[in-house]
């Protein structure tokens, strides 16, 4: 395993062990709800179904559409804040 992969694995393990991963997930969910991300994604889902027709939509292609759109809809500032929180967490804990 290369060094970058090792660092990611160690960080992930520390996030889980300390409960920080769960806290970050809860924070992110709350932020996404607050900025209207869920509502926008639901509206996009309804649009896709209406455009293609219910009979033509499969779970797989709906998931693919929603995954792409969901990533696009996440505000850049929210991603920056999340990365900053992870960096701060990592800086506060012993590096391997």
Image (cartoon, grey):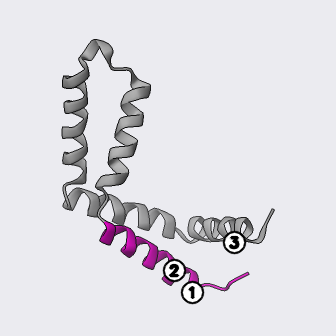
N-terminal label among 2 and 3: 3
Residue appearing at x 71%, y 65% in the figure: 5
> Mark 2–mark 1 contact, CB under 8 Å?
yes
Q: Say what secondary structure mark 2 lies in.
A: helix
Quote the CA–CA distance across marks 2 and 1.
6 Å
Q: Which residue is mark 3?
A: 7
Specify few, some or many for label 3: CA neighbours under 10 Å numbering under 14, 14-19, or 20 or more. some
* Residue 77 in the image: above or below residue 59: below
Left or right: 23, with 70 as reference point: right
Q: Say what secondary structure mark 1 lies in.
A: helix
Q: What main secondary structure does the magenta stretch of the protein show?
A: helix
In the rendering, at what x and y percent does residue 21 appear? Answer: 50, 65
Pick out the residue farthest to the right. Answer: 1
Foreground pick, 41 / 25:
41
Specify few, some or many for label 1: CA neighbours under 10 Å numbering under 14, 14-19, or 20 or more. few
In the rendering, at what x and y percent does residue 72 appear? Answer: 33, 53
Residue 80 is covered by the magenta coloring: yes
The quadrant holding residue 36 is: bottom left
Foreground pick, 1 / 21:
1
Residue appearing at x 65%, y 66% in the figure: 13
Give residue 60's mark.
none
From which residue to which does the magenta span run? 76-96
The quadrant holding residue 77 is: bottom left
Q: Which residue is mark 2?
A: 87
Q: Which residue is mark 1?
A: 91
Q: Say what secondary structure mark 3 lies in.
A: helix
């Amino acid at each position: 395993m290369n060094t970058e992969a090792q660092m990611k694995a160690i960080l992930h393990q520390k996030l889980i062990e300390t409960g920080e991963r769960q806290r970050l997930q809860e924070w992110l969910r709350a932020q996404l709800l607050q900025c209207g991300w869920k509502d926008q994604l639901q509206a996009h889902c309804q649009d896709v179904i209406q455009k293609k027709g219910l009979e033509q939509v499969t779970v797989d292609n709906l998931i693919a559409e929603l995954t792409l759109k969901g990533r696009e809809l996440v505000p850049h500032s929210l991603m920056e804040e999340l990365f900053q929180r992870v960096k701060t967490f990592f800086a506060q804990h012993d590096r391997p």
